[in-house]
Structures are given as structure tokens and as C-alpha cells.
Amino acid sequence: MPSLLFVCTGNICRSAFAERYAARLAGPSSPWTFVSAGTQALRGAAMDPLMVAELQARGGSADGFVSRQLAPELVQGADLVLGMERHHRTVVLDDFPARLRSVYTLRQFGRGARSTIARGEDLLTEVAALRPPSRSGDDVADPFRRGERAMAQIAEEIAAELDAWVPRLVS
């Protein structure tokens, strides 16, 4: 079963939202598994209540979500790893340099995905061949403790990125 790992810092806002929103887009019959972790996770914590509200407003559910620390087995088991910031990508690649062709920022992968019509696992191959460069604007800002407005903005940014290619990935 193919797997996509989302990575952020605390695993209670950005990566948690991305995991659950991508799963909603994919639907229950998808062969893909979506997971998330944090580089400095608030282990065992629930998703931030403001982000839960954003997820629910988009038809997703945070039921049963528990944050977890980034671990080698999560990276090794993932077909694709997407960091919310360039720093998260770097943290993964520092420990797993051989995974260079499957570790991106969310926006970096999105640029590559939008430049091809590939579907399914061919999408991963096409984006790896294109290898879009990392840019300073690739970072998805951390909305933690920045209020409802910041949380809504970041949820919208992540949702827009995922809307652009998750349906093709899982088809």
C-alpha cells in the first residue's frame, strides 16, 4: 500500500491537517495511506482545535488523531515525504540522503505535479524527473498560537495545494 508522509514541527496543525485532508480527498477506497509526524512533535497531543474546525469545515475529521514524532520507520515506509518548510525537508534528508528523489516541500512537489498530467504512481516518477527546485517561498508558515485567522489562511493554502494533485495521485 503506497504511503505519503507529511512533516511539520509539532504535528498538531499543518501536517496533521494535510494528513486528514488528503485522506478525505482520496476517499475510503484509496490504496494510499496518509500519515504525518513532527520534527519536534507534541507527542500524543490532539490536533489544534482551531485546525480541527478548519478541517471539519472542509469535510474532514480529526477523530482519533494523535501527534507523533518523526521516526526512521515512518520515512522508510513512505513513498513520498512532504515537509511544510524547507527546514523539515532538510531534517529528513540529513538522516536519509538516499531519499532525495522522494522528499520535497509541499509546494515544491505541487509545482512539479501541476506541470504534468501524470496520474497514480507515474505522478511521483514525473515529479522526480522534473525535480523542481526548492524556493524560499516554499515554506508554509506555522499558524500555531497565531489565532483563528492565521489558522484559516494556512488551512486554505494547504487545501489548495492538495486539491491540485491528490485526486490524480490516488487515481
Image (cartoon, helix red, strand yellow):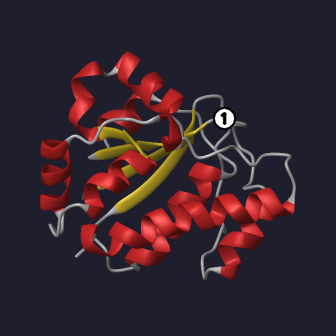
Q: How many tags in the picture?
A: 1
Is 151 or 10 nearer to us in this picture?
151
Q: Residue at x 17, y 70 (%)?
A: 117
Residue 128 rendering spot, x and y as whole percentages: 18, 43
Q: Residue at x 58, y 62 (%)?
A: 157
Is 136 or 85 nearer to us in this picture?
136
Residue 101 rendering spot, x and y as whole percentages: 21, 35
Q: Secondary structure at mark 1?
A: loop
- Residue furthest to the top: 94
**Quadrant of image for the N terminus:** bottom left
Q: Is residue 86 visible?
A: yes
Above or below residue 24? Residue 2 is above
**Quadrant of image for the C terminus:** bottom left
Q: Residues within 10 Å of mark 1 (few under 14, many from 20)?
A: some
Q: Residue at x 34, y 50 (%)?
A: 109
Q: The residue under label 1 is which amino acid type?
A: Ala
Per the image, the residue denoted by label 1 is 41
Is 64 on the left or on the right of 119, as rendered? right
Above or below residue 66? Residue 10 is above
Q: Is residue 51 visible?
A: no
Residue 56 rendering spot, x and y as whole percentages: 69, 77
Above or below residue 42? Residue 111 is below
Residue 80 rendering spot, x and y as whole percentages: 31, 46
User: Residue 159: which quarter of the image?
Assistant: bottom right
Is 81 on the left or on the right of 160, as rendered? left
Above or below residue 171? Residue 32 is above
